[in-house]
Image (spheres, rainbow, N blue to C red):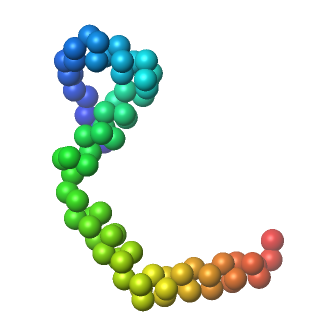
Amino acid sequence: MHKRMTITLDEEVYEGLYRTVGKRRMSQFIEDLVRPHVMSSSLDDGYKAMAADKGREAEALEWCNALAKDMADEAR
């Protein structure tokens, strides 16, 4: 769900934003910049920890490869 808000920017900043990302993409651009500063990083930290677990990554890769092989045998 999205919420609407009004912000005030210096005119030069607004014009630069408009030139750089375009009028219809400003909100998403600003959200992408702000999100890492206001959202909990625990999910990112969890993913980093999982990626660092070499045994778990090897098991996941083996599982994905087996799944791909199973799908290759499916009738189309």
| Nearer to me, 39 or 2 | 39
Which quadrant of the structure image shows residue 55?
Answer: bottom left
Residue at 56% across, 86% down: 62
Residue at 20% across, 46% down: 37
Side (left or right) of 2 relative to 39: right
Query: At which x and y percent is residue 52?
Result: 36, 77
Side (left or right) of 29 relative to 10: right
| Nearer to me, 52 or 67 | 52
Residue 12 versus residue 71 in the image, above or below: above
Query: At which x and y percent is residue 45?
Result: 26, 67
| Nearer to me, 44 or 75 | 44
Residue 3 versus residue 22 in the image, above or below: below
Query: At which x and y percent is residue 33?
Result: 30, 39
Number of on-image labels: 0
- Quadrant occupied by the C terminus: bottom right
Which quadrant of the structure image shows residue 31?
Answer: top left
Residue farthest to the right?
Answer: 76
- Quadrant occupied by the N terminus: top left
Residue at 62% across, 82% down: 65
Residue 18 versus residue 56 in the image, above or below: above
Residue at 26% across, 10% down: 11
